[in-house]
Each structure stands twice: as C-alpha cells, then as structure tokens.
C-alpha cells in the first residue's frame, strides 16, 4: 500500500501554533461549504437583476458543484506531490479571486464561469485539511481536531441559507445579491495570510506521480452523473439523460478496475480500492453521504418553497433557519465529550432524531394548509433536526476513519472528505430534480416540497439502519 499522508514521529509536538493553524484551515472549509448553497437564497434577486431564465440560475449552483466534484480527488493528490501548504494557499487565493469575479459579474454567463472556477479552487484547498490534521497533531489530539472539523461541516450546512438571508435581506453596503460573494474576499484574505504564517509544509516523502488516466475517468464519471440530474428536469427528461447515467456507471467501473490494477502493481492509485473491502468503512461512507446530502438538499427545498411559494423575504427565511444551529449548539459539544464511550450510539440516536425531524417538517407543511404556512410551522422540525445533526456531524468523520488501519489513514481521509463534499452537490442535484419534476407535473409548491423532503426521510432512515456496521467509537491513540 502506498503512503498518502505521512505523519512524522514529532507530528504536532513541535508545532506550538497547531490549533491556530487548524482554525485557519477550518475557516477555508467553512467558506467552501457555505458557498455550495448560499446562492439559493440569493437566486430570485440574481434572476431579477441579470434577467436570467430559471435554468441558467440553477447552473450557478451546478457550476460550483461540478468544478468542486470533478477536481476534488485530484486536489488531494496534488497536495501529496507539491506540498499541502502550497496547494492550500493556491486554492484559497484562487477561491478569493473567483469570489470577487462573481461579485463583479455583469451577466449570467460571467457568473456561471466564475462559479466554476470557484469550485475548482475549492477542490485544491479543501482536501489538504484532513491530511494536514494527520500531520500537525499527535494521535492523542486528533479526535478533538476531527471533532472540530465535523462541527464546522455541520455548522456550514445550516449557515449558508442564514447568511444568505441576512446579507441579501439587509442589502449590505447596497450590494444586494453580490454581497454573498464579496463576503468571501476578506475571509479568504484572512485565511490566506493566516495559513502562510501558521501552517507547516508537508508532503509525501516519496512524491507520487499523478494518475492522469484516473483523473480523467473520475472526472468524466462525475460529470456524466451530475449533468443529467441538473439539466434533465429543466429539459423535461429528454432521452439523452438515461444513457448518460448508464455511461457514468460504465466509466466509474473502468476507473475502479484501473485503480485496483495500479494498487496491485504498487503504483499509487488515486483511490486505493482495498479500502472498500472493509465493511465498516463502506458503511461509514454511506452514512456520511446520506447525512450530508440530505442536509444540503432540505435547505434548498425549504428556501425555494418559502420564497417562491409564500413570499417570504430572504431575511425572513434566514431567521427561520436559525432554529437549526440553535439545536446544533445544544448537542454538538456533548457528542464530542461522549464520543470515546458512546460514539456509534450517538450517531444512531442522531440519525433517528433527524429522520423524525424530517417527518415533523412534512407534517408542519401539511398542518399549515397552503397559504397559511409561515416560518413558525417549520421551526419545531428545524430545531429537532439541528439537535440530531449535532449528535452526528462532530464525530462521524473520526468514527469512519477508525475503520481503517493507521497506515491507510491518509488515503481514507481523502476518500471521506471527497464523499462529504460530493454529497452536498449530489443532494442538491437529486432533490432539485425531484422538486422541479413535481412542479412540472402540476403539483402545488407545498406538495412538491413535501415530496422532495421525502428524500431526506429515506436517506436519514437508511443512515440509521447502517450505523450498526460502524466502529463502536473513535480510534483511541
């Protein structure tokens, strides 16, 4: 097995500023995750200002998702080859510049192109974070560091619509929708400066060669999956969508065979296939995908429903969603403290609460009965969802990585990070397709929202069923 992330014998012990360095890298992770969906709240304002059709507005999210998904695995390997700090800095700089370009865009085409570059830059910076945690921290401190990473993932999923609502609703600095992009510039500059000062450089002691055929295949496979999911509903599901999905399966199968062959030859694959022979690791990835895809998607559906169907302002939507991070704050600290003794049970409990919360949201919409729906009907379900998510998000990454041997931790962390990032994009695509298809079939907007939220019920329920295969608790030092 080739080594993806090397942890020196003095890892973390000589790096007195490692917690400050972690804070800087997590700031970049937060910025990336928020940007996946923050434009949902701003979409009506963008459409009105730029005169864009609905399909073009959807591509504002899609372009970011595609740029991120197509290059995420490659970004991790580039860090192994050229140095994680160097690639992280390049990614943050590119992300910040692309955010400014989004804020300056004068047409929908310019905005979509800038969003694609923004996603590609995120794919360079985000994969370095988990690998850097492995390098910076001694084993005794890694559970806390991974807990903070998980907490940031959870907070970002809820913060995107809230931040979008507050920025657009208050017309900050008179920038209207452009403020959701300009806010990244000072944050990005702070992360860039902080990382330059605080991070230490690390790379594989034997820099691997980049698996270019693997890069092309995984990129093509993800594109063939995401494109029909995003464009298909707008085009009325034409005949070309299903052959593209079938082609994606074939391409990804070839990718898997190529990776297995490289691994047998000790040639450093992009993704070591041997990781997927471990049942608990595969189950952990499935739980992570279910959880993070559902959270991103449910905020998309509720935002569109409240703004388009019930006339709530961006600010009102953002304030409604405050219930989620309030619930998250109640349980996230508890989950980190109890993870060492009750990790798997906490994740199972959180998944059960999340499933019940989605049912409560659907019931709240039904009880309100159409025009009477307000944000208050959704607050109980959102609060419960935050409570459940707080039990899962801060500890899930560390539990999943506990399923693999220490020597494979670097490769496994790259796979987990990829799954979490792609899950958000895939959830938005899948649930967006359900929502758009339901509306096209003549359903009213509330029924379409309830039907789409059913995805989250099924996904969280599936995650609950799979928690029994997870390791009992995070790996002890």
Image: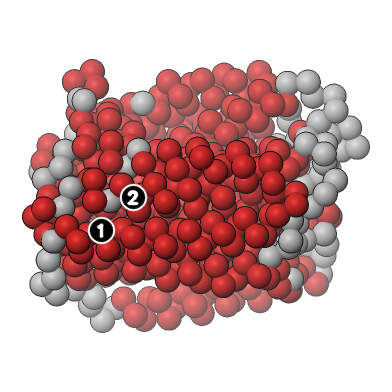
Q: Is residue 323 above or below residue 190?
A: below
Residue indicated by mark 1: 364
Considering the numbered disc 1 on the image, is that residue within a helix, a strand or a loop?
Answer: helix
Classify mark 1: residues with Cα within 10 Å, few (<14), some (14-19) or many (20+). Answer: many
Q: Position of residue 127 (x, y in %)?
A: 61, 45
Q: Residue lying farthest right?
A: 9
Classify mark 2: residues with Cα within 10 Å, few (<14), some (14-19) or many (20+). Answer: some
- For the N terminus, the image quarter is bottom right
Q: Position of residue 23 (x, y in %)?
A: 61, 28
Considering the numbered disc 2 on the image, is that residue within a helix, a strand or a loop?
Answer: helix
Residue indicated by mark 2: 380
Residue at 40% of width from left, 28% of height from top?
184
Please state if 192 lies on the left or on the right of 269 as rendered.
left
Marks 2 and 1: CB-CB under 8 Å?
yes
Please state if 207 lies on the left or on the right of 369 as rendered.
right
Q: In terms of image quadrants, where is residue 179?
A: top left
Q: Which of 373 and 118 is in front in this view?
A: 373
Residue at 20% of width from left, 54% of height from top?
305
Q: Distance between the residues labelled 2 and 1?
A: 8 Å
Mark positioned earlier in the residue sequence (2 or 1): 1
- Indicate the colouring scheme: secondary structure
Q: Where is residue 238 in the image (x, y as percent from the top left)?
A: 23, 77
Q: Position of residue 351 (x, y in %)?
A: 52, 61
Q: In this view, does 248 lie above or below 28?
A: below
């Amino acid at each position: 097995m080739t080594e993806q992330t090397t942890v020196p014998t003095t890892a973390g012990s000589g790096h007195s500023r490692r917690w400050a360095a972690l804070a800087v890298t997590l700031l970049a992770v937060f910025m990336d995750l928020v940007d996946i969906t923050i434009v949902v709240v701003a979409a009506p304002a963008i459409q009105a200002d730029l005169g864009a059709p609905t399909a073009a507005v959807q591509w504002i999210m899609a372009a970011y998702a595609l740029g991120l998904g197509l290059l995420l695995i490659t970004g991790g390997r580039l860090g192994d080859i050229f140095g994680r700090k160097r690639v992280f800095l390049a990614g943050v700089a590119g992300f910040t510049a692309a955010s400014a370009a989004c804020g300056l865009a004068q047409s929908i085409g310019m905005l979509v192109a800038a969003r694609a570059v923004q996603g590609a830059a995120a794919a360079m910076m985000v994969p370095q974070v988990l690998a850097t945690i492995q390098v910076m921290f001694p084993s005794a401190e890694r559970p806390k560091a991974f807990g903070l990473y998980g907490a940031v993932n959870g907070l970002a999923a809820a913060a995107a619509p809230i931040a979008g609502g507050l920025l657009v609703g208050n017309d900050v600095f008179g920038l209207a929708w452009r403020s959701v992009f300009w806010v990244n510039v000072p944050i990005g500059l702070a992360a860039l400066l902080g990382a330059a000062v605080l991070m230490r450089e690390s790379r594989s002691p034997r820099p691997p060669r980049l698996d270019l055929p693997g890069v092309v295949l995984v990129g093509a496979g993800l594109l063939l999956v995401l494109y029909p999911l995003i464009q298909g509903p707008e085009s009325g599901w034409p005949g070309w969508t299903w052959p593209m999905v079938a082609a994606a399966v074939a391409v990804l199968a070839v990718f898997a065979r190529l990776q297995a062959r490289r691994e047998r030859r000790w040639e450093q694959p992009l993704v070591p296939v041997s990781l997927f022979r471990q049942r608990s690791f595969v189950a952990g990835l499935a739980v992570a995908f279910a959880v993070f895809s559902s959270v991103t998607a449910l905020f998309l559906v509720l935002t569109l429903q409240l703004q388009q169907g019930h006339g709530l302002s961006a600010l009102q939507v953002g304030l409604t969603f405050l219930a989620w991070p309030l619930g998250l704050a109640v349980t996230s600290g508890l989950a980190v403290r109890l993870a060492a003794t009750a990790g798997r049970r906490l994740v199972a409990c959180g998944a059960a609460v999340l499933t019940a919360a989605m049912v409560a949201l659907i019931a709240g919409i039904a009880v309100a009965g159409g025009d009477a729906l307000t944000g208050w009907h959704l607050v109980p379900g959102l609060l419960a969802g935050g409570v459940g998510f707080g039990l899962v998000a801060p500890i899930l990454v560390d539990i999943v990585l506990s399923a693999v041997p220490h020597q494979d931790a670097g490769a496994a962390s790259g796979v987990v990070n990829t799954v979490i990032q792609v899950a958000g994009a895939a959830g938005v695509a899948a649930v967006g397709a359900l929502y758009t298809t339901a509306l096209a079939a003549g359903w009213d907007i509330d029924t379409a929202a309830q039907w789409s939220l059913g995805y989250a019920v099924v996904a969280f329920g599936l995650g609950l069923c799979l928690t029994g295969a997870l390791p009992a608790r995070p790996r002890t030092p």
